[in-house]
Structures are given as C-alpha cells and as structure tokens.
Amino acid sequence: MKLNNKELENKKVWTDKGYNVLSYDRQKMIENTHNNPMWVHFGAGNIFRIFPAKLCQTLLENGLTDRGIIVGEGFDYEIISKAYAPFDNMTLMVTLKADGTIDKDIVGSVAEAYPFDYSFTDEWKRFEEVFESESLQMVSFTITEKGYALKNPAGEYFPAYLEDFKDGPGKGRMLFSRLTELLYKRYKKIGTPIALCSMDNCSHNGEKVENAVKTIAREWQKNGFVDEGFLSYLDNKVSYPWSMIDKITPRPDKSVAKMLSDDGFEDTDVIVTNRNTYTAAFVNAEECQYLVIEDDFPNGRPQLEKAGVYFTDRETVNKVEKMKVCTCLNPLHTALAVYGCLLGYDLISAEMKDEDLVALIKRIGYTEGLPVVVNPGIIEPKKFIDEVVTLRLPNPFMPDTPQRIATDTSQKLSIRFGETVKAYIREGRNLAELRAIPLVYAGWMRYVLGLDDELNSFTPSPDPLLDYAREELSSVKIGKEVRVDDIRSLLENESIFGVDLTNVGLAELVVRDFNSLLKGKGAVRETLKNYLN
C-alpha cells in the first residue's frame, strides 16, 4: 500500500484495512481547479494538510464544491518535492482519538502544489495565471507568526525587505513581496476583489497580512513601481479576515508509523528537510479542532461553514482568540511545559496522570481564569476547558512534549497569564486570589536555571530572551534565599510578565514561590503539593 493515484485504484485493499478513501472524482476536481481556480494556500506544512485541506475535502465529498486548493510553499521547497510530489499531492490523515483509536483518511483536495519562487519558471507563470483569474476567491496562509514580520525585534526592517522595497516587483526575496506582486498583476489585469485570510495561530493575524501587503505596496508606490490606484485597490477591493485556529499537530510519530506499517502502508518514513521541517506522507493530529473566521470575502468563498468552520464578525473572532490564548488552553499548556521539564516528563499526556500538575492547570483555568474570561458567545468557555482537560491534553496518542511547548516561553507569559492579572486589576479583584499564576511565573524563573527537580542539568528550549533571563538570575543559587531586590529588574519587566510585578503587588508572592522552588532537591514537587493541595 503506497500513497499514489495508481495504488488507490484498488480501493478495497485500503477499505479492508480501515482507510477512508476518496469518494469524488479527483481527476475531474483537478481539471476544474486548473480551469477555474478558487482557493490558493501558502504554507504547505502539516497543519494545512490535516485541517484546511480536509475541510475542502469535506465539501468535495458532499458535493458542495467541485474544486480543490492550489498550494504554494515559499520557504521550504523540499516539502513540495518530498512530501507532495511523490504522493500525487495527497496526504494520509491520521486522527489520534482520546479513546486510543485512530481514524485514517486519504485527503486529496490539493489539486496543484508548487514552490513559490521565480526560479521555478513554469510554476511562477502558473501563479500569475491563477491570480489573474476572476474565479479566485481567497488566499489563505499557514506560514507561522514569524512569516508575517517585516521588522526585527528592534523595529528595523529586515535587509531582504529593504532590498525588495528598492528593487520592486519581479525581484521579491520575501514571500509577501512576491504575493504583493501577484496582487498588483490581478489589479492591473482584472481588478477583481479577493480575500487574504491568515489561518495561523497568532493574534490579529489578518492585521498582520494587511500590514505586510500594504507596507510593501506603499514603498513600491514611493519608488514609482506601482500606481496609487493599487493602494486604493488594496484598501477597497482586498479583505484581510481575522481568524482563530486551534488544532494540535505534532511531528509525525514513530508509534503511528508502526501502526500504519502493520497495515501494510509503506510510506511511513519521516522526512526531515534541510530547513529542519519534519513531515511524512502521513500527518497525525488530535481529533478536536476549531477554526473561527471573520466573514469578509468580497469575491465569495467556499461553504466552509458546512465543514464545521465558524463564520462571524471580527469582534467575536478576537474574543474567541482571547478566550483560548488567555484562559482556556494556552495557559494550561505553558504551565505543563514549564513544570513538565522541571519534573522530567517528556510527554504532555503523561503529565495529565500527575495529580499535582492536573491540580495546577485546573486552578489556572477554572478557578483563576474563568471568573474573568472573555466569553465569545459562539463557544462556551467552561465547555472548552472541560474538553482540554478531559480529552485533549490526556490523549495518549498525542506525542507532544513539554520541551516543544516550552519554546519561546518568555514571549508567551505576558499574554497567557498577564492578561488575567490585568483583568483582575480592572475589575478590582483581590490579586491574593491568584495562586497558580504566580507559581507559573516563579516556575519559569526556576526553569531558566536549567536544573530539574533532581538538580540534574537540562537544556531549556530555544527562547530569544533566555540569555537575558539567565543574566538577570545569575546570582540565584539552589538553597539560597532570594529577595525581591536581587531580581527586581526582571520582576519589573512588563514585556515578559505582562505587568510590572513590583508595581501591581505580586512580586513578593512570586519571589516567595520562587524561594520555595529553590530549596533543594525535590523542592518543585513539594511546592506543588503544599501550595495547591
């Protein structure tokens, strides 16, 4: 059993092994897409292959569309050559269910997939043709949050963008420069509206798309490469819907590969590209998923609401994002990441068998977060947390690690915990009611030291402020009590904690927790037991 068009002609071989095969005429779909393209997606990674691509497939299977998706990859071209082309642009979707079973679905909604770069001449011409098509309704993105950045943390434009501003269309080094060029071609050829819809897991993602495209266009207009009418087109004919996406998609897992291999499925090798992308013919992910999108599509859109997507207004999308990121999922994940590393865990699901850690995240979500949660109306916050705590995080088939989740924690604390602290202050609540959140702040500082609860050294996950935090904590030693003044500069850092801990009155509590965690071997476990049980 190999994943390609030829092998799938014998459907019975697959269905006998429990695989769900395609129920529509894929070749006809490919022809329809070629002639009247509807949807382009940039970012060929695993989250796209198992979520947006599957949504489109659901429409195809139910006769709600006759066209698929054209995919462009602007960063890691090996994904196309190694994870798309050999499998005729199909994916084996493996759904890891909380009851220990798996679903296996062939996803074939990708009609075309190409590197998005001038050096691939024919492919670039195809993108030009697609963007000049009246039928094109939407462009979506899963390119990770950093893919939208035009500037470095110091607020300076990246050199490649400065070159793109200077050189204009036809020489774009960056994805958004090339995208803006295609939009200019669309404007000049037909002037038809289009939606640019980020599906990346980052706040205000539509705003990030809009800023990138319009900034490039303005710089080009200043330099005489495009006319003012193009800027008007981007303002009035192009929309930038906001969205919230939620689906945990770990790297291809060896245990999943083993189960597939036992079926006779041969394409189980994990592919690691030169840019360190982990992919395969299959993608494994959790069953739970959410996609909420601002309904702003000036040239129409696929009927994705009939595949489970929530369409709403921008304010509601923002509320859903805040509910998830500030209360119902991300804070719980980050707490498990920090303390999981300190306690020697290598699976999030294993941590959910630890009574102390479960008590910690339940207090963060139910006791401290829910009283001030932003309720979006379309999704009930308590039900969302219930699903996270009882189904998603304990899922034994989810090979997600605290080490992966701990990446860039300094960039996450302010949103995932600081917003709750701010809400308490706004509502006049007593900050002394917060016990778990200060413990996470303290836990992160203990984590930065790179010593687990047995005092064995470990390497913290990559983080842009790790060196800074270590310098601020350089005087801290296990077994030696710390005072607020010893680490005041760090405690005052609003960019990390979301608030100045000394100014709002939380510094003493955080330092008290920190000192408890520093007492010696086993102090992390003892602190969790004493403070939360």
Image (cartoon, rainbow, N blue to C red):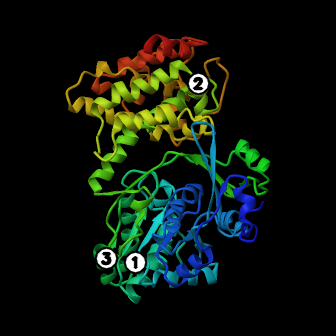
Callout 1 amino acid: Trp
- The N terminus, quarter of image: bottom right
Query: Up-down: is 317 above or below 340?
Result: below
Q: Quadrant of residue 294?
A: bottom left
Q: Hey, what amino acid is under mark 2? A: Leu
| Percent coordinates x, y for residue 459 in the rendering | 64, 33
Can the viewer see residue 408? yes
Q: Earlier in the sequence, mark 1 or mark 3?
A: 1
Residue 220 image label: 1
Expressed as whole percent of the image width and height from the top left, the position of residue 521 reads 61, 12
The picture quadrant where one finds residue 224 is bottom left
Q: Residue at x 73, y 61 (%)?
A: 12
In three-dimensional space, the C-alpha distance between marks 1 and 2, rounded to whole angstroms, equals 50 Å
Q: Residue at x 46, y 21 (%)?
A: 359
Foreground label between 2 and 3 = 3
Measured in 3D between alpha carbons, the distance from the residue under mark 2 to the one under mark 3, in whole angstroms, is 51 Å
> In the image, what residue type sits under mark 3?
Lys
- Sequence-first tag of 1 and 2: 1
Comparing marks 1 and 2, which lies closer to the viewer? 2
Residue beneath the point at 49% across and 55% down? 146
The quarter of the picture where residue 24 lies is bottom right
Q: Which residue is tagged 2?
A: 342
Label count reads: 3
Q: Name the N-terminal-most of marks 2 and 3.
A: 3
Q: Residues within 10 Å of mark 2 (few under 14, many from 20)?
A: many
Marks 1/3: CA–CA distance? 19 Å
Q: Nearer the viewer, mark 1 or mark 3?
A: 3
Q: Is residue 114 left or right of residue 297?
A: right
Check disc 3 and report the residue beneath it. Answer: 237
